[in-house]
Amino acid sequence: MAQAPGSGLQWTELIIFGLLFGLVTVMGFLASKWKSAANLDHLDEWGLGGRKFGSWITWFLLGGDLYTAYTFVAVPALVFGAGAIGFYALPYTVLVYPIVFLPALRMWSVSRAHGYVTPADFVRGRFGSPTLALLIAITGIIATMPYIALQLVGLEAVLRTMGLNGTGIVGHLPLLIAFVILAVYTYQSGLRAPALIAFVKDILIYLVIIVAVIYLPAKLGGWGEIFDISQEKLQQPSPTTGQPSGSIVLSDNNQLQYITLALGSALALFLYPHSLTSVLASRGRNVIKRNMIALPAYSFLLGLLALLGYVALAAGVKPISNNATGQPDSNTVVPVLFDTQFPSWFAGIAFAAIGIGALVPAAIMSIAAANLWTRNIYKEYLKKDATPGQEAKQAKLASLIVKFGAVAFILFIDPQFSIDLQLIGGVLILQTLPAVAIALYTRWFHRWGLIAGWAVGMGWGIIMLYGIPNPKTGKEHFGGSALVLDKLSIFGWRPFAGSMMQIYPGFIALIANIVVAVIVTVIARRLKIVNGTDSTSGPDYHVDEHDKDLRPIGSQ
């Protein structure tokens, strides 16, 4: 077995981790020659992999993109700390695929027809509004940043468990080195790098989880024993609040939170720029159809991963203290579980799986954010005559800035509740749903209605998040993503005063967004205000890879 976590460097684990990390680093650099065009000096090539990924590559890429350190670290940590509410991630990943099946096909087709690289490109073409496209681009970049930071938190949890738990900047040095390597091979190879590495990541993850869900329950007395111990521990009063920290079943107060969180997360997932980047990199509509059918296999994997939170409770896992903050880091729950229950050599493989599972989506996210900056801010406002080569160079530089911006961001966050980084980002990205997803089917909304709805949704969403405290740390603002209905205020009116039931604020903000968009649209139509020019047409939403006269890949 591995030595006790926190007692020094775990050399066996570090060596295996380093070897596997070195393998994917080499693959990242070699990826520029894999399925490559004459050069990568075009966003179609660097940012979308030439738009020619088939079913298997897309399946691994989307899996690597959507199932991240959030899945491997944050969800089990939430189950460990709060119980059943952490399983909201399971129904949301079941709901998401039928919800996005048809919109994803329409987005691929219209983007392929017009050469769109980002969702903001589509909005620009659909409504003829550079302002609305700018708002969508800014939202995508801002919402992606905490998601990238979550990947860093997951990687740091693994490094900390292996003994790399220094104070100050020294404590973050291994993370900085890892991201320098990531930044360099992403700069060189673009989307091809994470697409190729995703094969290794998924193989490792499936291997580790299959072993974990068979070996660990057998070692700890079976699932019945695990659930009994978990319920007993979750029911113990918290020293901070005096209340039980959670339960293995939902309570009356968090059932609405569970439902709205699952539905809101499902609606948000494919609005994220990195999700759409993986879709647009596909070769054709049939590739997307096959993936929407096959990707629920990852949902099964997610359920097994979430259960590890209960396994960690039964095993008596204690989170490692972050030497930089002096606080227990709950994100180390699964790494510590593996470290204490597996032989050192297998724990090293498990840590590599989690670490690579953080790097793959971080690369895709930084590429997606870079594409938004390049197409919808740089070219639209700073250099309208930018050539494809200049666009590609700008995107490469932007991807570096995004990565290191996320590294800087992690220095100022509380990693104890890293899952809220993703949920807070979800509140923001949900506000693009009317302009992106609904607009794939109808242009009824007026562009000024969409802008007004976005402003209200974003503003109210941020205000609600600002007012949520964290009772465990004493943090007064941005302390979570569960809003108590008693605190819901509409211009001073509190419709649910006295209710302790919780709800996901992103869901409320989205409803307000749509209501305002409808009202302003009706007013704008009555006043006959021009709604911009739609550069798309009906057939554009149904084109496929072999259609005649289809726009050549890599053309301006």
Image: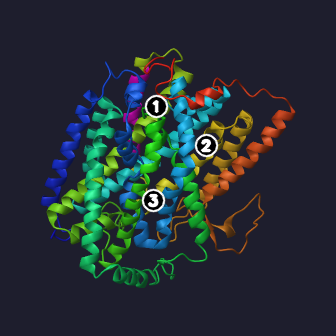
Sort mark 3 into few (<14), some (14-19) or many (20+) by Cα contacts within 10 Å: many
Residue occupying image coordinates x 24% and y 33%: 29
Q: Label 1 crowding class (10 Å Cα cut-off): few <14, some 14-19, many 20+?
A: many
Looking at the picture, how far across and down is residue 470, in whole percent?
52, 67
Which residue is labeled 2 in the image?
Answer: 432
| Vertical placement of residue 346 versus 291, above or below | below
Marked residue nearer the N-terminal end (2 or 1):
1
Residue 516 located left or right of residue 324: right
Please tell me whether mark 2 sits on a helix, a strand or a loop. helix
**Element class at badge 3:** helix
Mark 2 or mark 3: name the one nearer the start of the chain: 3
In this rendered view, identify the residue nearer to me: 5 or 355.
Answer: 355
Separation of residues labelled 2 and 1 (CA atoms): 17 Å
Residue at the spot 34% in from the left edge and 83% down from the top edge: 225
Q: Is residue 214 above or below residue 136?
A: below
**Residue receiving disc 3:** 419
**For the magenta stretch, what is the residue range?**
391-406
Q: Amino acid at mark 2?
A: Thr
